[in-house]
Amino acid sequence: MRTILLNPGPVTLSARVRAALTRPDLCHREDEFATLQDGLRRKLLAVEDLDPARWAAVLLTGSGTAAVEAMLVSCVPADGRVLVIENGVYGERMQRICAAYGIDHARVHGGWGEAVDLDAVRTALAGGPYTHVAVVHHETTTGRLNDLAALGAVCRDAGARLLVDGVSSFGAETVAFDRWGLDACAATANKCLHGVPGTAFVIVRREALAAAPSRGVYLDLADYLARQDAHGTPFTQSVQTFYALDEALDEFFEAGGRAARQALFTARMRRIRDRLEQLGVRGILPVAECSCVLHAFELPAGRSYAALHDALKARGFIIYAGQGALSEQVFRISAMGDIGEEDLARLEAALGEILA
Ligand SMILES: Cc1ncc(COP(=O)(O)O)c(C=O)c1O
């Protein structure tokens, strides 16, 4: 029996992606590596059909947080100021990154699960100036998909550009880089794109790095950009995870690209949510406010998360706990990864056995 990961990354790998991990050993200073890296950078831009003259994908070896941190420390000029939007763990993490690096910032704090308060953002921006607004697209804490079209319009009026944590949305949800006024979006290989953990990336507007300050060494995007444009890399990259992402992107485009992945996840989530609702388990947010990637559900009365998790694990499924104060109130299920029709049918049956 295959174990299916329903946690929000890493995901259940396809056989193709797993096999790519065993391609021949490769030195990161050889031409073959440069070709692999160049191809990956092209394919990542193609996910949202971005113009390589204006946008660049910068590849990093690290987890999603490395990409978010690199974006914040590299895109905010020395005299810049950031408004950080918080409505979950990952917005709050961006605030901690700004504080740790001494980046001038303020926050618009919302409760976990609440929609972004656009009036509060407008008021805060009016007290600016702010060069940037940092926001999580899909706040994985609760499954909420923040409305970046509306936020982008508010920011445009105030002359601020968006820095987006797209770690759990890029590759499935639309990220309208130009229309929403992004300077950058940070993401990772091992979520919606179905690669393995170890490769993260930032898609950045080239001009946004023109005034990049040097706040660090390992996470300096301008340095990576210059070296990757010259077909090199400042540091050793995780070659095998590059191979896996390359295969995962080929699979992604063969299956129809971003819109097809969004449709796939939406259909899977609908099926899982319908089954849970039949069993009396409710989502914590309306479907229209959720990402297609993950929904959070209320733990049924009298059930602990641990008991539900263990019963599903015994049947081959890994679900995910709520974070912080939500840990005994909600559980989360994600639709990412190589999940087949028979796996979904098995999941529906398992939920029935455990919850009926
Ligand atoms: C929205 C978001 N941002 C950042 C992260 C952090 O990613 P990582 O654990 O890969 O550092 C996650 C992880 O789930 C996430 O969902």
Image: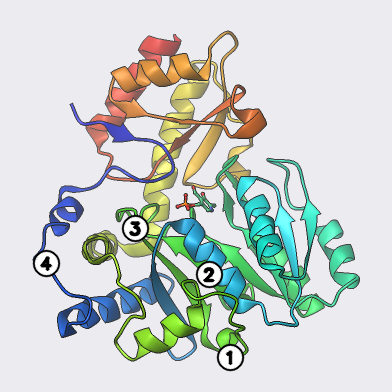
Mark-to-mark CA distance, 2 and 3:
15 Å
Please give the name of the residue rendered at 60% of the width and 72% of the height, measured from the top-left corner. Answer: 73
Disc 2: CA contacts within 10 A as few (<14), some (14-19) or many (>=20): many
User: CB of mark 4 within 8 Å of CB of mark 2?
Assistant: no
Mark-to-mark CA distance, 3 and 4:
17 Å
User: CB of mark 3 within 8 Å of CB of mark 1?
Assistant: no
As displayed, is residue 92 above or below residue 81?
above
Q: Quadrant of the N terminus?
A: top left
Farthest residue to the front: give it.
Answer: 217
Mark 3 residue element: loop
- Residue 82 visible? The answer is yes
Please give the name of the residue rendered at 33% of the width and 80% of the height, measured from the top-left corner. Answer: 233
As displayed, is residue 152 above or below residue 227?
above
Q: Which residue is mark 1?
A: 210
What's the residue type where badge 1 is placed? Ala
Mark-to-mark CA distance, 3 and 1:
27 Å
Q: Which residue is mark 4?
A: 25
Q: Which residue is mark 3?
A: 198
Q: Which residue is mark 2?
A: 70
Mark 1 residue element: loop
